Every structure is written in structure tokens, then in C-alpha cells.
């Protein structure tokens, strides 16, 4: 499910049994489908969380950067990451904080979106 903030469609979610390449493919699809999308997807494998953030051109133009977003969500789960304004990946360790990290995506967008 997507929520709209500042004209941007924000999508977050857990993806079961996905590889990093699977997340990248899904993020690319979402980014190419809607230039105003901000997506953060996560998958858990053992004790490791893998995150992907993807931002369409419209989202990047409104000040939302995937690299900055991934740094915020991975930090909440005891990990790190980075990347480009339109696509970024990272990892985390504390699955108990995953829902909180995904919820933080909305806070990030609300704080950083420029009309």
C-alpha cells in the first residue's frame, strides 16, 4: 500500500525470500513506473536485513534522496548503507527495529520534501 505525501507516492514493505538483486529489480520497476515514487523495500535473511531505496525523478527533484533515506533506515537497525539519489542499498542487523525503520520513511519524506 502506498501513501501520498507532498505529491509523492511513498511505498514501504517487507519482501519475503528476496535477494538483493530481487529488491533492486522491484525498486527499478517502481521507480520507472512512477516518477513521483519513493520506495523502501526490505528483506530478512537469517540475522541480516537488506534494504533498498528507490526514488523517481520527481521525488529527487523535490529533495528526496535514496542515499540519505537508506542511511536513516539502516541506522535504526544497527547497520549502514548508501547510494545515489535515485537508488541506494544497505544492511541492518536488528530485525526487532525493522517496522520502526520502515515507518521512519514517512517521517523522512515529510521532513525533506520541497514543494
Image: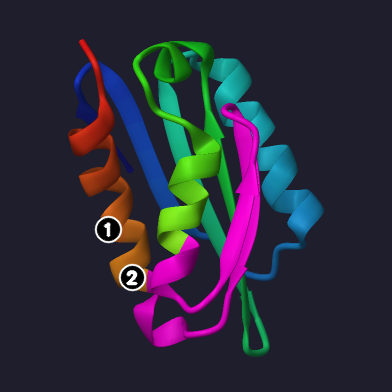
The secondary element bearing badge 2 is classed as helix
Q: Check whether the beta carbons of the residues at disc 1 and disc 2 lie within 8 A of each other.
A: yes
Q: Residue at x 33, y 70 (%)?
A: 99
- The region drawn magenta spans 74-98
Q: Residues within 10 Å of mark 2 (few under 14, many from 20)?
A: some
Q: Which residue is mark 1?
A: 103
Which of the labelled discs sits on residue 81, or is there none?
Answer: none
Q: In this rendering, would 26 be left or right of 106?
A: right
The secondary structure type at the circle numbered 1 is helix
For the point 55% across and 41% down, which residue is it?
67
Q: Report the residue at 21% width, 47% height from top.
A: 107
Scheme by which the image is coloured: rainbow
Q: Is residue 85 above or below residue 44?
A: above
Give residue 97's quadrant in the image.
bottom left
Q: Position of residue 100 (x, y in %)?
A: 29, 69
Q: Residue at x 33, y 27 (%)?
A: 9
Query: Is the residue 98 above or below the residue 57 in the image?
Result: below
Q: CA distance from mark 1 to mark 2?
A: 6 Å
Magenta stretch contains residue 85: yes
Q: Label 1: how many residues lie within 10 Å, few (<14), some (14-19) or many (20+)?
A: few
Q: Is residue 37 magenta?
A: no
Residue tagged 2: 99
Residue 26 visible to the viewer? yes
Amino acid at each position: 500500500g502506498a501513501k501520498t505525501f507532498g505529491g509523492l507516492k511513498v511505498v514501504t514493505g517487507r519482501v519475503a525470500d528476496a535477494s538483493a538483486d530481487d529488491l533492486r529489480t522491484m525498486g527499478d520497476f517502481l521507480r520507472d513506473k512512477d516518477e513521483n515514487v519513493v520506495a523502501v523495500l526490505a528483506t530478512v535473511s537469517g540475522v541480516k536485513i537488506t534494504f533498498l531505496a528507490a526514488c523517481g525523478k520527481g521525488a529527487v527533484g523535490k529533495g528526496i534522496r535514496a542515499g540519505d533515506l537508506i542511511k536513516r533506515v539502516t541506522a535504526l537497525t544497527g547497520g549502514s548503507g548508501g547510494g545515489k539519489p535515485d537508488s541506494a542499498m544497505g544492511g541492518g542487523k536488528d530485525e526487532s527495529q525493522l517496522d520502526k525503520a520502515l515507518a521512519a520513511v514517512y517521517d523522512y519524506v515529510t521532513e525533506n520534501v520541497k514543494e
